Every structure is written in structure tokens, then in C-alpha cells.
Amino acid sequence: MQVTENSAEGLKRDYTIKVEADVLDGKLNERLKQLATQIRLPGFRPGKVPLSHLRKLHGDQLLGEVLEETVNTTSREALEQNEIRPAMQPDIEIKEFEKGSDLEYSLSVEVLPEIEPADFSKIELEREVATVEDSEVDEAVQRVADQQKSYEAPKSKAYKAKDGDLVVIDFVGKRDGEAFEGGAAEDYRLVLGSGNFIPGFEDQLIGVTVEDEKAVEVTFPEDYGSEDLAGQDAVFDVTVKEIQRPVDAEIDDELAKKVGLDDLEALKTTLKESIQREHDQVSRLKLKRKLLDRLADLHEFELPEGLVDMEFDQLWQEQERALEAEGKDLESADKSEEEMRVEARDMAVRRVRLGLLLRDIGESNEITVAAEELNRALMQEAQRFPGQEREVMQFYQQNPQAMEQVRAPLLEDKVVDFILEMAKVTDKEVDRDTLFKDPDADNDA
């Protein structure tokens, strides 16, 4: 194998690689010999088929396989010989090839940049922390009580339904006087004001009494799931069978027992710990963002254009999907296409720079993700799909790229922790509102 470097500009490298014809022929003969021990042909004993005959029958097919294998192995060897760390998959182009001639192909690749990490001990960061206030715990207890509320029928049948009441109804939906499929139900339990039904339906039941029959007129939303009903007017014939008023749950030990705890104090302790974990997670995320901002400012190095282009394309596709979800396109967006492209490009540059930096820090300090850490993350992902856990696990195990998407954030967090251990981090006590305030809120105003 002969490797010739044609150019080396910035992070781009271009090589010509030549593999001699006799090497290819030797590899082809090896494949033919393997085939001879396996193939059975009429008129020949097993293992006695002449190579010349096999070459006529299968030579072209096997030569194609030999070429592919040779390009794969020699390209890897060429990169290793030249101590090249590719930033992404090399571009390979085979020049004109004829049987019996040398194999010659070009290999173009972008290399990873040399990175000189900053002195992390000189990085100073402020971490916002918030103590859980008693009022937060009280609000959380109240939410639990609201979830445990019960309903009871009023004593008077003349009672008129109010917002928040539960009504038990039979209904039949009609369009142009004809009942439509899926528009009827019996003993349907509906909490007025819950927003669970078609807009306008619940409002028209305010004031009804038991045994009332009412024609409820509605218009289905334009984005309704059924195309036949979307945007259409309909009338629901409703019969009110029961009305029940909400009864607030008492905030006491019995409330705690309803959710599996011993007493009210245990409920408060559990809720306080949960809120504190929420605070800590937000505090950690904001500190991580400050660190990444600082790292981006401290490091300037050349980036592989291919990686930036790939990241930009992904961001731009996300931008287009976000606009589509809002019912907009590039022309009706709040910003011009040029502005959005500049922002997406800047974000792509930032992500690639930080990604390469964190990767380099991780490799140079031998920071890895342990198998049990990865398995734990995979199990958490699988649990998001009840009943399909096994299939989800198999998907990740069979797809290295998908597996890497689970591993990457774990590794990133470990590298961030490694840097934070050396940085000077001071805590600043703030209230909950300040802690949860979006750092970009002032910039967006």
C-alpha cells in the first residue's frame, strides 16, 4: 500500500492510496480457496473445484467484496500511519479501476483540532441555591389535598350545577339531525371547568339541575382529530342524571395515609425533600450553563467544517419543525430567514466547540461511562414505554448510534463534574422565583 499526502490545509487532509494489483489478486485467491471448501458443483468432488473455474463463475462478485474490504482496511491503516484522528467519516472515491490493475482511491478527511484546555482552577462561578420555604410545602400539601377531593350529591334536587361540580350525563351528538359515530355515551362523568370536552360544551351545563334535558350547541375545533367533524357545527342532546359537589379533603394524618404515608408530618417531609431535589436540579442546570458559557469564551480553536455543517443542518430542521408546529413558515416567522440562519450557525459553532472540548477533556483524563451507569440510563428510558421495555432495550443494543445518544449526555455530565471540582464555585442564596427565572428572559423582553 502506498499513501501519498496531496494537501494539508487547516484541518483538511487529502490522500491518494494505491494498493498493488498482486495484493488484490492474492486476497481474491484467498476468498476463492475459502469458497472451494464450501461450494458444491455438479461433476466435481467437494473441495476439488478448480480455482480457475470458480474465478469464472464468481470472480467478479468476489472481486467487488475484496475491493470493499480492502478500501475499508487500508483507509483505516492510512489514518493510523499518519496519526490522523478523524472528526467524522472520511470521504472516499475510487478512481477508475479495471481487473488486473492497481486499486487507487482518494481519501479526504477532516481531523480533530489540537486543543489546549484552560486552567480550570482559575474559573470562578456563582451557584444559585434556594432553601425550601414552608409556604412551598403548604402549597404542595394543598395540591395533594385537591387531588384527593371527593364529590357528594347536594340534598336538594333543585341544586344548579356550578363550575367545579361533577355531572353524570348521557349524551348523543348530532350533525344535521343525524347522530354521528363516537358521539354518544352513557353515565359520562364530567367535571365542569376541567376543559376535557369540546370548547363551549361545559359552559352550557352551568346552571342545569338533575333530570334536565338540554341541547348543547358546539363547533368542533379546526384541528379536531376527526376530519369529518373538524370545524363542523353539532348539537348534543344531554340528559343530566346526577350532580355532585366537590368536597375538599381535610389536611390531616388521614390525607397522608391516603397517599401511603404514616402521618401529615411524613407527608410534609416527603414533599419538602421532593421540592429540594427540584431546586437542586435547577441550580445544577444553571451552574452547568454558566460553566459552558465560560468554557466557550476561554477556548478558541479551528473547527471541522463538516461537523459544523452537520450540526447546523440538524438545528435548521428543528427550527422548521418548530415553525410548522406554530402554523408558520419562514416567510411568516418573527425573524427573517437570514437572521435565523445566522443564529443557527452561531449555535452550531458553539455546540461543536463545546462538544469537542468536553470530549478532549474526557479522553485526556480517562473519564468514562461505566456499564452499570449506561444500563441504568437505558432502563430509565425503557420505563417510559410500559409494556415495551424489552423491545426498547433491544433497539438500543442493536443500534450503536442510538446507544451513543444515551451515553453522550452521561459522559458530558461527568466531565462537567470533573471541571467543577477544580473551579472556584461560591453559593448565592436566592428565592425560588429567582432560581427558576429563565436567564434569557431579560434578553427576550
Image (spheres, rainbow, N blue to C red):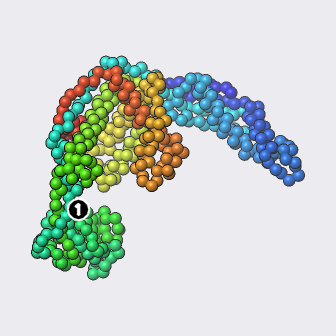
Identity of the residue drawn at 65% across and 35% down? 71
Image quadrant containing the N terminus = top right
Q: Amino acid at mark 1?
A: Gly
Give above or below for 425 relative to 401: above
Identity of the residue drawn at 30% across and 53% down? 326
Can I make out residue 396 in this image? yes
Q: Secondary structure at mark 1?
A: loop
Image quadrant containing the C terminus = top left
Closest to the observer, 377 or 443 = 377
How packed mark 1 is, by other alpha carbons closer than 10 Å (few <14, some 14-19, many 20 or more), is: few
Give above or below for 372 relative to 389: above
Closest to the observer, 386 or 218 = 386
Residue 195: % across, % down:
23, 62
Q: Circle 1 sits on which residue?
A: 195
In the image, taking residue 131 as reference, residue 295 lies left or right, namely right
Residue 23: % across, % down:
74, 31
Identity of the residue drawn at 79% across and 48% down? 39
In the image, taking residue 105 as reference, residue 260 lies left or right, namely left
Q: Residue furthest bottom?
A: 177
Closest to the observer, 226 or 134 = 134
Identity of the residue drawn at 38% across and 42% down? 315
Tally the marks: 1
Quarter of image, res 115: top left
Closest to the observer, 394 or 40 = 394
Residue 266: % across, % down:
24, 44
In the image, taking residue 308 as reference, residue 15 lies left or right, namely right
Can I make out residue 282 in this image? no
Residue 391: % across, % down:
50, 51
In the image, taking residue 118 as reference, residue 11 lies left or right, namely right
